[in-house]
Image (cartoon, helix red, strand yellow):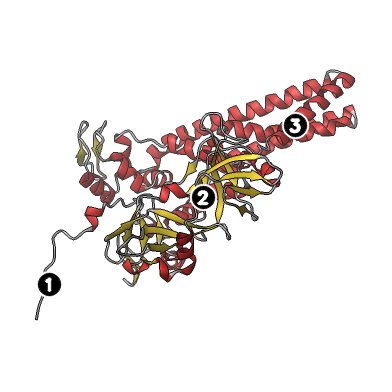
Amino acid sequence: MRKGKDIIGKPVIAYDSGEKVDNVIDLIFDQNDNRLLGFLVKEGGLFGGAKVLPLYLVKAIGVDAIIIPDREAIAPSKNYADMHNILHNNNILNGTRIMTTDGRNLGKLIDFYFDETSGIIEGYETSGGLFADAYSGRSFVPAPKTLKIGRDVAFVPVETVALMEEQVGGLKAAMQTAGSKIQETAQVAGTKIQETAQIAGTKIQETAQIAGTKLQETAQVTGEKLQSAGQTANSRLTDAIVDRSAQKQFVVGKVAQQTVIDSDANLFAKAGTVINESMADTAERLGILDRLYKSAGGNLTEPLSERFNGAVAGLTVEQAQGRRAQTAVYTPEGYIIAAQGQIVTPQAIDRAKVTHRESELLSAVGLSTPAAAQSRAGALVATTGERLQSSTSAASERINESAANMWDRVKETASELQGRSAHALEEKRIKGALGRPTTRVILDRNDGIILNVGELIGHNAIETARTAGVLDILLDSVYTEAPHLSIDELRAPEKGRAALS
C-alpha cells in the first residue's frame, strides 16, 4: 500500500518521451466507495479547467516519480464525471474527525493509505484520539467496509476499536496461565516437574548454542575446504553465497589488502591498489572475482549469518501478528508493508514474506529475531504446560516428549540450513531474476537468441535456458541495480530543429 501525502508533489513522467509532464497537486478520493480515483495535476482557474490523472492509467508509482504511458493520460477533469463532481463539490477530508458509532473518538483524519492498483483505502492516519501514540500523537485506523462520512465527522463501526487494539495479550495470557498451572502442579508433584522443566530449558539453550557453534564451524570448515578444493569450487561457493554483482559492487573503490594472483600465477593486483570498475570486470572475466572480493575485505560469514537470521525470521514472523508497528516498514521501492501504529495483520505478514522484509517487520513491532524465536518456543511450552493438570506422571512424560521433539526440530532446522542444496540456491536466484533485464545476449547451444540485452527475464526464458544448459549464464547476467534518473538526464542533450520541406 501507499501513503497519500507521499504522492503529493511527485513529478509525473511520460514513459514514451521521458519528459516531465506535471506534478501531483492533490489526491481525488471517492468517499462513497472509499476509493482513490486519481490525482489532481492542475487546478482549475479563469483560463482553463482542472486536469486530472486517473489511477488506472498510471504505469508505475515509484520512489521519485509517477510514470504514465504518455501525455494523453492527463486530461481535463470534465472528461471524467466522477472526479469532476468531486472537485466541483470541493470535498475536503483533511481534519474530519473519525468516531465510532457508539461515540468513541479515534482522532482527526490527516492522511490515508491505499492500494496502488485498485485504489481501495486500507487505513487512515489520524492525529489524537483513543489510540494516539504517546510519542508521535498518531494512530492507524483500519478502513472498514462501511464508512459514513459526514460534514464534520466520519463514523466507523464499533468493531474498528478491536482492530486497533494489540492482541499480544492472548499469548501473554497463555504463558501466564501455563506458568500458574505448572507451579500448582509442581507443588503437588514435588521436584520432578521442576527438574524436567530445567532439563527442557537447558536442552533448548544448549541447542541454540550448538546451532550457533555449528554455523561458525560450518563457515570455518567451508573456508578450509575452499583452499584445498581448487579455484572452481571456491568461486562457485562464493557466487552461491554472494551474488557476483554484489561482489563487484563491494570491491569497487576498496583497497586490495592482499596481492591477487590470477589462475596462471600472474600478478593481477598488488596489495594497496585501489580497485576500480574495470578491474572488477576483468577479474570476473578471468574467473578470479572471488579472490579480489576477499582481498578487498569481503567474507562469507556475514552473508551466511544474514541468511540464517533471515531464515529464522521467516519461520517466526507470525509472532508479529497482533502487535502494533512502532515504525513504518517500507520496501526499497517505497511500498508500505505496515504503517506506523498499525496492528499487524496476516495480510501485512504475507506482504513481508513476499518482499523478504520479515526481519524489518519483527523489528518494527519491537521483536528481535531471537526474541521472536523465544516467543514461539514459549508458546509451545505454554501449550505443554496446559496439559500438566491431568496427572503428575503424565505431565512429566509430556514435557520430556515436548523437549525431545523441540530438540529434534531444532536439529532438523539447523541441518536444513547447513545442508542447503544447490537446487534451493538456484531457485532463489531464479526468483530474484524474474522480471529483471539481462546485461548480455543469452544464446543457446545453436547460437539461437534466447534473450537480447535489456529484455526482461520470464518463466519461458528460464525454462529455455535450463533446457539449453545455459541457465547459469542467464542468472549471472541479471541487472540488479535500481535506476535513479533525474529529469535532466531524461531530456535530450540539445534541442532539435524542425525540418521544413
Q: Which amino acid, by three-letter code, is at mark 2? A: Leu
Q: Name the residue under label 2.
A: 93
Earlier in the chain: of badge 2 and badge 3, it is: 2
Q: Which mark is residue 173?
A: 3
Q: Which mark is residue 470?
A: none
Q: Is residue 216 above or below residue 29?
A: above
Q: Is residue 329 visible?
A: yes
Residue 318 in percent (x, y) is at 63, 42
Q: Distance between the residues labelled 1 and 2?
A: 48 Å
Name the foreground residue: 378 vs 71. 71
Label 3 Cα crowd, 10 Å radius (few <14 / some 14-19 / many 20+): few
Q: Is mark 2 on a helix, strand or loop?
A: loop
Residue depicted at x 38% and y 37% = 227
Q: In this view, does 229 lie above or below 67?
A: above
Q: Name the residue under label 1.
A: 498
Residue 136 in percent (x, y) is at 51, 32
Q: How far apart are marks 3 and 1 (CA)?
A: 77 Å
Pair 2/3: label in front: 2
Q: In this view, does 485 lie above or below 175?
A: below
Q: Which amino acid, by three-letter code, is at mark 3? A: Ala
Q: Distance between the residues labelled 2 and 3?
A: 40 Å
Residue 268 in percent (x, y) is at 21, 41
Residue 62 in percent (x, y) is at 39, 53
Earlier in the chain: of badge 1 and badge 2, it is: 2
Pair 3/1: label in front: 1
Residue depicted at x 13% and y 66% = 496
Label 2 Cα crowd, 10 Å radius (few <14 / some 14-19 / many 20+): many
